[in-house]
Image (spheres, helix red, strand yellow):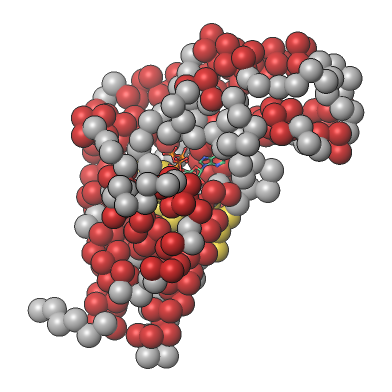
Amino acid sequence: MRIVSGIQPTGKPHLGNYLGAIRNYVRFQDEAEAAGGQSLYFLADLHALSQPHNPAELTAATREMVATLVACGLDPERCILFNQAQVPQHAELQWLLNGTARMGWLNRMTQWKDKAGKDREGQSVALFTYPVLQAADVLLYQATHVPVGDDQKQHLELARDIAQKFNFDFGNGTDIFTLPDPIIPPDTARILSLRDGSAKMSKSDTSDMSRINLIDDADTIMQKVKKAKSDPEPLPSDPGGLEGRPEARNLVGIYAAMAGTSVADVLRDFGGHGFGKFKPALGELLVEKLAPINARFVELVRDTEALDAILAKGALKARDLARPTLAAAYAALGLVRG
Ligand code: AQP
């Protein structure tokens, strides 16, 4: 079992990242260890270059993201935690895979279409080739499983297509790359924006009110939940009644996920009550569950040297693991190296 996944150090990590991905990172750190495997988690700082960015903010956000991941339960002694920029093999393998990935495949990516919108000509090349770097990120380590939220499912399918074509074209009967399987949490694969029931909660949303940041203080969390978009109807008594009510379903789903219970159980307690009663309960639950993460983050983020040391140590291990696969890819392509 080799688990690999990444998160962009852009903006502040939020509840969607936590429930869709980070919580699974922690779970699979434990499972991989128990199975005698390994887990690798990286900060996708190279991916951050696909959008206009401020260099000083990227540096600060990278350290904040390490602190957040450790505060959420990743243990750098038990998993490999690093940033792409310190492992040049990611960018190298991307270039090798650029020869295999097809323009048509990339053109079909919904994230590219959504982010580029009508201005395709004005986008960076990096935004277009983003999924090829993402394929390199996981194929480089022969990942078997990749914990991600729903929005990354299509990119992972593309990584499998690239791996399959590369193996077929250049493998000479052997598999250079393992085909990775996504691990998508069944109930929290897509946490929605608090302001718009048709959009996912996202770091890049211009409104901070659209998301609960993992390091928001108690007052801010209560305020954001209170202002979250809902509807005037009371909550139903069973999950079927949430049909066609995306905001209500989202808030109830968040409650269930954070309480470690089912949507049906939450509705058993709150069915028939309006949001005037449900929202304060949800706010308090979030404050209670996020308080330890918040406290640990505040402690960790002060020590930038310790955070940099975590990344340097992780990068050393990642570079070692990446070497054989990259060498095999170079050789398969017939590239001569000394
Ligand atoms: N709303 C979400 N619900 C469930 N999972 C989510 N993920 C992201 N948003 C949700 C998962 O978190 C991991 C890291 O993804 P990311 O760094 O791309 O985070 P983001 O919030 O999506 O960041 P951006 O910069 O705001 O990107 P866009 O603009 O694409 O939304 C991934 O596993 C992701 O699935």
Image location (x, y in percent) of residue 277: 77, 12
Measuring 66% from the left and 21% from the top, which residue is drawn there?
A: 229
Image location (x, y in percent) of residue 312: 23, 44
User: Would you place residue 245 above or below residue 96 in this image?
Assistant: above
User: Would you place residue 1 above or below residue 60 in this image?
Assistant: below
User: Would you place residue 65 above or below residue 213 in this image?
Assistant: below
State which quadrant residue 135 falls in.
Answer: bottom left
Left or right: 8 in relation to 187: left
Quick one: 324 or 252, which is closer to the camera? 252
State which quadrant residue 142 falls in.
Answer: bottom left
Measuring 22% from the left and 85% from the top, which residue is drawn there?
A: 334
Measuring 36% from the left and 20% from the top, which residue is drawn there?
A: 299
Left or right: 301 in relation to 69: left
Furthest residue toward bottom: 172
- Confirm whether residue 328 shows in the render: yes
State which quadrant residue 279 falls in.
Answer: top right
Measuring 53% from the left and 43% from the top, which residue is drawn there?
A: 21
Location of the C terminus (image quadrant): bottom left
- Confirm whether residue 13 shows in the render: no
Quick one: 128 or 24, which is closer to the camera? 128
Furthest residue toward top: 219
Image location (x, y in percent) of residue 261: 75, 34
Furthest residue toward left: 338
Left or right: 137 in relation to 214: left
Image location (x, y in percent) of residue 258: 65, 30
Number of numbered markers: 0
User: Would you place residue 16 above or below residue 220 in this image?
Assistant: below
